[in-house]
Amino acid sequence: MTAKEKQTEFIKSYLKPTLKQNGYQTSGQTWWKDKGDFFSVINLQNYSWNSKDNVDFRFNIGIALKATVKDEQKKKATYFDLTTHLDEGTFLPDRINRKFGNNQGYSIKDNTNFEEFLKAMMMDFETYILPGLEEPKTLADCIKFYERFPFWGENLKRVIAENKL
């Protein structure tokens, strides 16, 4: 399998079903979960330098306030609706020394062992990322969660205030 085929297989066999099981809906490479006044959002971003033999990518993760999403029916969120922007590394205990990535995200090459890659991704998502995204259940929880990221915490408070939420 090429690196691109491995990424596609990871998305199809693991990522989409796992996120669906956890209540996420999808459109393309963006997943969102309705949490009342906001959506938790996960977006897979491929890098522009990718080839079929070498694929680098990251996950953009954050929340989108329903009051500010572009969808008129307020039923879905996109990457462009995010009020806060984090990446998967924020949730991991060691964002730099990952077996299949570094501070910039994940990397798959032609010689990447798919089973090892899949096991590492399962660990990241099931042990750290998904539990971290479950933590905020209300807007007050979101404020508390994002206070540890000064720029995003302040931005979230500002947008909440501007929209009288």
Image (cartoon, rainbow, N blue to C red):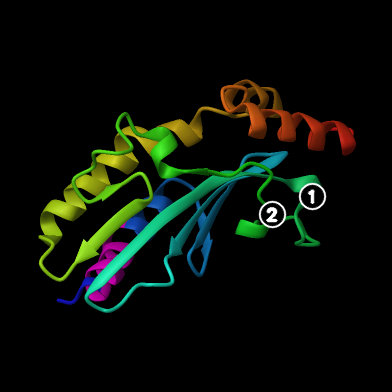
Q: Is residue 3 left or right of residue 164?
A: left
Which residue lies under the disc numbered 1?
68
Check disc 1: other Cα within 10 Å, few if <14, some if 14-19, many if 20+: some
Q: Which residues are magenta?
A: 4-14
> Which quadrant, please, contains the N terminus?
bottom left
46 w.r.t. 89: above or below: below
90 w.r.t. 2: above or below: above
Q: Is residue 95 left or right of residue 63?
A: left
Front residue (pair 90, 124)? 90
Q: Residue at x 22, y 71 (%)?
A: 3
Q: Are marks 1 and 2 in contact (CB under 8 Å)?
A: yes
Front residue (pair 29, 98)? 98
Q: Residue at x 33, y 37 (%)?
A: 95
The amino acid marked with disc number 2 is: Asp
Q: CA distance from mark 1 to mark 2?
A: 7 Å
> Which quadrant, please, contains the C terminus?
top right
119 w.r.t. 157: above or below: below
Residue 22 placement (x, y as % from top left): 43, 45
Q: Residue at x 10, y 67 (%)?
A: 111
Residue 87 placement (x, y as % from top left): 47, 44
50 w.r.t. 80: above or below: below
Q: Is residue 10 magenta?
A: yes
Q: Is residue 96 visible?
A: yes
Dominant SS of magenta comes to: helix
Q: Circle 2 sits in a helix, a strand or a loop, which is it? A: helix
Which residue lies under the disc numbered 2?
81
The amino acid marked with disc number 1 is: Thr
Residue 65 placement (x, y as % from top left): 72, 44
Q: Sequence order check: which comes first, mark 1 or mark 2? A: 1
Q: Is residue 58 magenta?
A: no
